[in-house]
């Protein structure tokens, strides 16, 4: 069995690492080829994850880099096609919903190579999000759909997708979290930044709808106000950093830092009093860890995190940040149950299906 794994962005290294590990040990005679598209390329957005997650060096680096959606997708397709033609894989494995995912699915489908999609079936029902378009295309053309939450089943059925293509296996990002638990519990990243465990808010923002326009300076202003009540730690994604520099926003009182490696970042989530984010993965990690999460978006493709009781949708509305301290005070401390099959074994279930 020859498998080509196509990965290119920070969250997708995390989602795919345990799947590569499980399939390499289950199919030791197989050929496992890793292609890094280069959608993310800064050391702190890329290499550091390969080192921490124990993923072997990529066999191919496509060095696609940044660009418009069309440019990024087209460049990936153009550079991936000859790799797939030479490798002749039996399967192309892709995670998530980013432009690298879309490009890999289209390239493989047109070469008539079966595709497996990790984290299939998520829907925000908001087609202004580039990721929603990528998800729909990936699920339409992938043959093996690996679902991480049961709500994905209904989403896929509604699109007429056949049951036999769906495999509810659980969340591979949580596999990585579980595997790193000893390390991140010992990392002490909060102390290294000079904040007390349980006492600070961790912030990440990177979605175009929030950071590419007028909402970003308003959000920073609201965070600075919140910092009078609790320390605010904000590792800044490169897209956000660029936009903050462009609008020269002032950020008194915020603890800004570079993007962090995964162990340090998980340590900061696990010790946070609360998290404010527009990321999908962080809504899941906080749910597993039982940390209150406030999501600065109008919708989420992960309603399972809301049902679990950890995640609150604030809307795409920076003003709502002011209400976080009151909402935190009103919360019950009952630890939530993680959603079904978020147990560290999802990648083994994927290996069961494929092997
Ligand atoms: C991408 C995904 C998004 C995912 C996110 C995770 C798409 C459409 N978006 O968004 O779904 O949640 O990754 O982080 O695929 N940049 C750097 N260094 C890097 C990478 C990016 O400086 O290593 C800067 C560049 O200025 C680039 C910008 O960030 O133009 C945006 O990068 P891009 O990959 O286009 O999208 P993300 O915002 O990272």
Image (spheres, grey):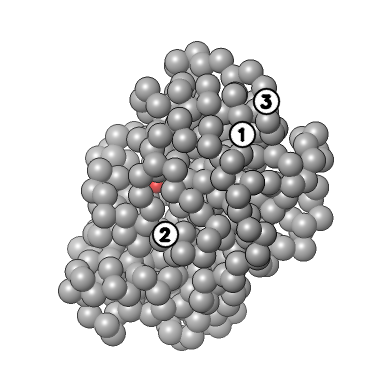
Q: Residue at x 61, y 34 (%)?
A: 234
The span from disc 3 to disc 2 (Cα, nearest Å) is: 31 Å
Q: Nearer the viewer, residue 236 or 230?
A: 230
Circle nearer the N terminus (3, 2) = 3
* 10 Å crowding of disc 2: few (<14), some (14-19), many (20+): many
> What is the quadrant of the N terminus in the image?
bottom left
* 10 Å crowding of disc 1: few (<14), some (14-19), many (20+): many
Q: Is residue 220 above or below residue 82?
A: above
Circle nearer the N terminus (2, 1) = 1
Q: Is residue 214 above or below residue 82?
A: above
User: Which residue is situated farthest in the left direction here?
Assistant: 160
Q: Classify mark 3: helix, strand or loop.
A: loop
Circle nearer the N terminus (1, 3) = 3
Q: List the residue tagged with mark 2.
A: 302
Task: Using the image, tell me which numbered label, if any, was put on residue 234.
Answer: 1
Left or right: where 214 falls relative to 19 = left
Q: List the residue tagged with mark 3.
A: 228
């Amino acid at each position: 069995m020859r498998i080509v794994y196509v990965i290119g962005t920070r969250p997708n290294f995390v989602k795919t690492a345990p799947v590569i590990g499980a399939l390499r040990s289950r199919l030791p005679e197989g050929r496992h080829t890793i292609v890094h598209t280069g959608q993310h390329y800064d050391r702190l957005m890329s290499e550091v994850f390969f080192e921490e997650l124990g993923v072997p060096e990529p066999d191919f680096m496509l060095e696609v880099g940044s660009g418009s959606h069309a440019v990024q997708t087209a460049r990936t397709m153009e550079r991936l096609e000859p790799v797939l033609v030479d490798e002749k894989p039996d399967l192309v494995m892709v995670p998530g919903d980013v432009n690298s995912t879309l490009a890999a699915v289209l390239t493989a489908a047109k070469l008539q190579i079966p595709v497996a999609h990790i984290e299939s079936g998520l829907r925000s029902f908001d087609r202004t999000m580039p990721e929603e378009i990528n998800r729909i295309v990936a699920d339409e053309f992938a043959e093996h759909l690996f679902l991480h939450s049961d709500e994905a089943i209904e989403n896929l059925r509604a699109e007429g997708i056949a049951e036999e293509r769906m495999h509810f296996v659980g969340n591979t990002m949580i596999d990585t979290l579980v595997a790193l638990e000893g390390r991140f519990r010992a990392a002490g990243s909060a102390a290294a930044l000079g904040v007390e465990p349980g006492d600070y808010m961790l912030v990440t923002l990177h979605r175009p709808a929030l950071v590419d326009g007028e909402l970003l300076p308003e959000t920073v202003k609201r965070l600075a106000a919140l910092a009078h009540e609790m320390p605010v730690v904000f590792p800044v994604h490169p897209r956000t950093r660029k936009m903050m520099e462009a609008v020269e926003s002032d950020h008194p009182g915020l603890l800004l830092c570079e993007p962090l490696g995964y162990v340090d970042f998980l340590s900061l989530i696990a010790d946070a009093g609360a998290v404010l984010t527009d990321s999908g993965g962080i809504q899941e990690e906080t749910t597993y860890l039982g940390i209150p999460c406030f999501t600065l978006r109008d919708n989420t493709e992960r309603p399972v995190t809301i049902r679990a009781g950890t995640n609150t949708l604030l809307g795409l509305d920076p003003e709502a940040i002011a209400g976080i301290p009151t909402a935190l005070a009103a919360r019950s401390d009952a630890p939530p149950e993680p959603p079904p099959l978020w147990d560290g074994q999802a990648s083994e279930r994927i290996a069961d299906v494929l092997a």
